[in-house]
Amino acid sequence: MPPLPSPPRWYAPPRLNWGTQTVKVIVGTTQKEYVVHKRLLCAASKFFERALNGQLAASLSQEVKLPEDDPVLFACVYDWLYFGLVQRVDSLAFIHARSLWYDDHVWLQIYRMADRMMMPGLKALAFKSAATSFGNHLAYIPSREFLKSLFEDEAPLALRMYVVEHVAYWLPKSANKDQWGSLFMVHDRFGAEMALAMLRSQAEGNLFQHPVDQVDFLKNHGFDLDELRQEARAADDEIGAQPLKHRDQAVLFYMAVLTFPSNRVRGISGLTARFQQETCVANV
């Protein structure tokens, strides 16, 4: 799968001058360090704004330690902050801790991290990306890992019901009903919701709509995506916005990582370091 295009402004990181002050975010048991512009991080996240500007020890050290979080997922946060994109590989899966993570599961984990860190822009992007994996033009079967996590751990009701009705829409139309039907056994709560959804599907027949075609489906299930996107844009400072040439330069670096396999193996750390140096100099 090709990388995601640059997100629309609604899903972009805050538009503002980053300044020159940086802070450290130390993630996971391996204590992976990320150096981030403080103003950018605080504008994007109320969690970090409170940690770095409040009465917590982090406000004195200008370091935030997240020992229980995943450095691989925080790298996605980092990519979004600086590139306006979330790094993707050219397939439906990538290897994480020697296990296979599919796109839907990745987006769900990014959503949860964004929710914990109170990042409305990334939260909206992750939710939208997770939901639009399941459309009315492609019979995309949810991964079992995604379904189990979606119904076993905390997740928005709107996303749960969106996936339930996606499956209920496609199962009768699919030639491979056994593969779809096997999903009922992934989690008891999913199976129970699917039983109800299939009753509605059978009763409505061809009138049963995919959730993407249902008016205000997300709002009717307690999730207001527009409100979330407006909250994200409240952090913008158009007058002091970072010059676009630096954002464009970041995207070029990002695309270089995706284009050359050797860059994917090495990761983006070298390109990111160079980008940070150049933007810091530009802000002086």
Image (tube, rainbow, N blue to C red):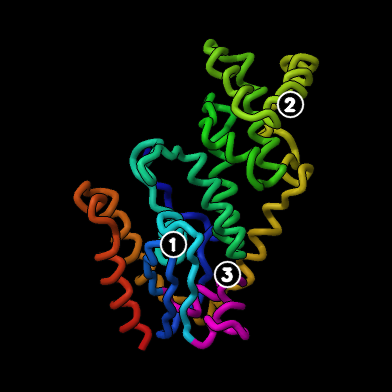
Residue sitting at the far top:
175
100 displayed left or right of 259: right
Q: On the picture, is 118 further left or further right than 222?
A: left
Considering only vertical position in the picture, is 276 above or below 87? below
Task: Tell me: residue 32, above or below residue 103.
Answer: below
Q: Are marks 3 and 1 in contact (CB under 8 Å)?
A: no
- Give the CA separation, mark 3 to mark 1: 19 Å
Q: Earlier in the sequence, mark 2 or mark 3?
A: 3
8 or 87: nearer the viewer: 87
> Mark 1 highlights which residue?
28
Residue numbers of the magenta segment: 36-60
Residue visible at 78% across and 18% down?
Answer: 199
> Residue 239 at x, y = what percent?
53, 81
Give the secondary structure at mark 1.
loop
The mark that comes first in sequence, 3 or 1, is 1
Which percent across, then down, holds residue 197?
74, 24
The residue type indicated by label 3 comes to Ser
Residue 234 seen in this snapshot: yes
The outermost residue toward the front is: 29
- Closer to the camera: disc 2 or disc 3? 2
Q: Main SS type for the magenta part? A: helix
Which label belongs to residue 45?
3
Could you tell me how far apart the alpha carbons at marks 2 and 3 are, in whole angstroms?
36 Å
Queried whether the magenta region covers residue 257, the answer comes back as: no
- Identified by mark 2, the residue type is Ala
Res. 192 mark? 2
| Dot 2 crowding, Cα within 10 Å, few <14, some 14–19, many 20+ | few
Q: Position of residue 142 (x, y in %)?
A: 54, 30
Amino acid bearing label 1 = Gly
Quadrant (top left/top right/bottom left/bottom right) for the C terminus: bottom left
Classify mark 2: helix, strand or loop.
helix
